[in-house]
Image (spheres, helix red, strand yellow):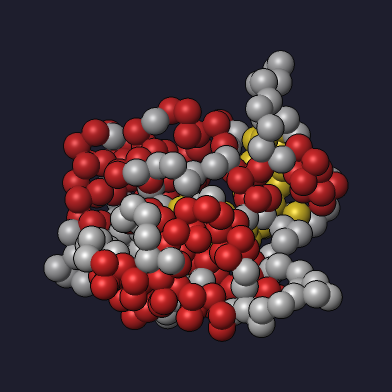
């Protein structure tokens, strides 16, 4: 990478870091802060990078940041879509298409997600690709951050990987399948006719899942907005939740958050999620 452009990348990162207050990203301000914005170590923490690595980036030294690191820095620094694209270009990385899993997360949704600390929440695309999860969502649903390609979509995994269905009781599988297909048809119709991502996924599922093909032929259309779900947690058992959705203006992204269903013991079970966390748990005996 050219040294001039790399120096500009470091300068740009510093300028964006200086404008963010700790409270904007859910961090305590503290009584003895020497800088008005975020510290370097705080940006590194938010982006999942080492402090030494981030320091090298701001100095305009070190190795070229990966596309995943650029996406993480854009989220950590609350960059707008234009700023995110600019950062990719400074790093000599291809700017991702906005509908891909590396897409820029809607800043308002990311801000709300940061503030939802006491309930599971995550941001997904209209094709059910998880973009970011808070710790409680990871504890409730599992960590989806490492999934790439078609497998990044939970809908694709639902119809191609039996283990994906462990999330819901078997009695609910038929209802979930029908709801996923109807939602996918609505999402695909809303996209631009030239968009190939949804068409590729639908074509793949039609060719590999007879269940999907049969449901697709029914032509049901319905966005998933407010659901009541039963989640089969490996440690806590059955948890009944309300799944609420906030859609972005273009419908491409959704903020999901989960609240306990009234009339159940799910409130206490959700409180236990913070204790259980993401520790490895063996399957309970049934």
Residue 224: image location, x then y, percent: 49, 61
Q: Residue furthest top?
A: 285
Instruction: From this view, report whether residue 56 is shown above or below residue 98.
Output: above
Q: Quadrant of residue 98?
A: bottom left
Q: Residue at x 66, y 43 (%)?
A: 139
Residue 145: image location, x then y, percent: 47, 46
Along the line of sight, which residue is nearer the eye, 258 or 228? 258
Q: Residue furthest left?
A: 194
Say left or right for 9 vs 122: left
Q: Residue at x 66, y 79 (%)?
A: 35
Residue 230: image location, x then y, percent: 65, 43
Say left or right for 95 vs 270: left
Instruction: From this view, report whether residue 101 is shown above or below residue 278.
Output: below
Q: Residue at x 26, y 41 (%)?
A: 205
Question: Does residue 223 appear in this view?
Answer: no
Along the line of sight, which residue is nearer the eye, 122 or 183? 122
Along the line of sight, which residue is nearer the eye, 191 or 210? 191
How many numbered discs?
Answer: 0
Residue 211: image location, x then y, percent: 33, 36
Viewport quadrant of the C terminus? top right
Q: Residue at x 38, y 47 (%)?
A: 153
Viewport quadrant of the N terminus? bottom left
Say left or right for 111 vs 69: right
Q: Quadrant of residue 239?
A: top right
Question: Does residue 91 appear in this view?
Answer: yes
Instruction: From this view, report whether residue 25 is shown above or below residue 54.
Output: below
């Amino acid at each position: 990478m050219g040294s001039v452009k790399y120096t500009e990348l470091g300068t740009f990162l510093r300028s964006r870091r200086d404008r963010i207050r700790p409270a904007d990203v859910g961090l305590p301000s503290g009584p003895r802060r020497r800088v008005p914005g975020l510290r370097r170590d705080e940006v590194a923490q938010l982006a999942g990078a080492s402090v030494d690595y981030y320091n090298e980036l701001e100095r305009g030294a070190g190795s070229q940041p990966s596309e995943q690191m650029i996406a993480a820095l854009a989220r950590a620094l609350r960059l707008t879509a234009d700023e995110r694209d600019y950062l990719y270009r400074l790093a000599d990385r291809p700017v991702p298409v906005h509908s891909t899993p590396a897409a820029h997360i809607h800043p308002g949704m990311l801000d709300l997600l940061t503030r939802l600390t006491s309930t599971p929440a995550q941001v997904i695309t209209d094709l059910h690709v998880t973009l970011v999860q808070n710790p409680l969502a990871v504890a409730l649903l599992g960590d989806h951050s490492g999934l790439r390609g078609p497998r990044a979509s939970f809908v694709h995994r639902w119809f191609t990987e039996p283990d994906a269905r462990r999330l819901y009781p078997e009695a609910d599988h038929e209802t979930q399948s029908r709801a996923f297909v109807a939602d996918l048809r609505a999402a695909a119709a809303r996209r631009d006719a030239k968009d190939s991502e949804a068409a590729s996924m639908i074509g793949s599922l039609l060719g590999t899942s007879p269940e999907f093909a049969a449901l697709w032929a029914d032509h049901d259309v319905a966005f998933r907005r407010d659901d009541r779900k039963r989640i089969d947690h490996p440690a806590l058992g059955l948890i009944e939740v309300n799944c609420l959705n906030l859609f972005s203006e273009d419908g491409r992204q959704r903020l999901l958050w989960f609240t306990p269903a009234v009339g159940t013991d799910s409130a206490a079970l959700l409180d236990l999620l913070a204790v259980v966390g993401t520790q490895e748990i063996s399957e309970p005996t049934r």
